[in-house]
Image: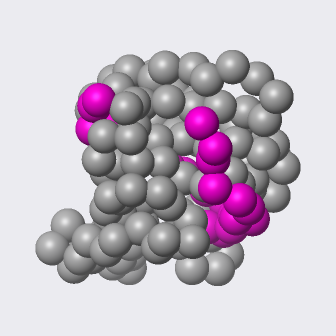
Amino acid sequence: MSSLDPTRNIFRADATPSFKGPADRFTGDVTINRLASATPPGFLAAVRVLFAPNARTVWHSHPKGQILHCIVGVGEFQREGEEIIKLFPGDTVLIEPDVKHWHGAAPDQAFIHIAINADDEAIWMEPVVR
């Protein structure tokens, strides 16, 4: 018989309330749900982020990179010095460590993505100017 606890590390949907994206990290109406956050020795965190039309992150980077998986709506993503890329449900973006970027909703569409980060780390910078 196994001594593993089958309920360990199950993150229940009703146990993690939504919260608003802080104004120093987001522009516009953003709602975040923490899906999972590992405790040592784990190192991954996952959040679901709902962006109202035209809402977005500020410029930022992640020391260990980030993965975005798009699930609803139309989004936008930009690496510093590159063109804005439209994102659609099913798209996945791998963002390399220390790459300055932003992401959010298209001007006329809401957008939801899952963000997976190592250690939930980010370096937050200035707002996006369009």
Q: Is residue 24 left or right of residue 27?
A: right
State the image quarter where residue 30 is shown. Answer: bottom left
On whether residue 103 falls in the magenta region, the answer is no
Q: Image point 47% across, 57% down: which residue? A: 27
| In the image, residue 82 above or below residue 119 | above
Measured from the top left, where is residue 44 in percent x and y? 59, 62
State the image quarter where residue 91 is shown. Answer: top left
| In the image, residue 118 above or below residue 39 | above
Quarter holding the N terminus is bottom left
Q: Image point 78% across, 35% down: which residue? A: 80
Measured from the top left, where is residue 5 in percent x and y? 33, 78
Quarter holding the C terminus is top right
| In the image, residue 46 above or below residue 121 | above
Q: Is residue 46 left or right of residue 83?
A: left
| In the image, residue 76 above or below residue 39 | above
Q: Is residue 98 left or right of residue 101?
A: right
Residue 21 seen anywhere in this rendered image of the structure? yes
Which residue occupies the foreground of this view, 119 or 99?
A: 99
Q: Image point 20% across, 67% down: which residue? A: 13
Q: Which residues are magenta?
A: 108-130
Colour theme: one colour
**For the view shown, which residue lies furthest in the front direction?**
130
Which residue occupies the foreground of this view, 24 or 19?
A: 24
Measured from the top left, where is residue 46 in percent x and y? 47, 58
On whether residue 122 falls in the magenta region, the answer is yes
Q: Is residue 57 left or right of residue 123?
A: left
Q: Image point 64% across, 80% down: which residue? A: 40
How many circles with numbers are drawn on the protein?
0
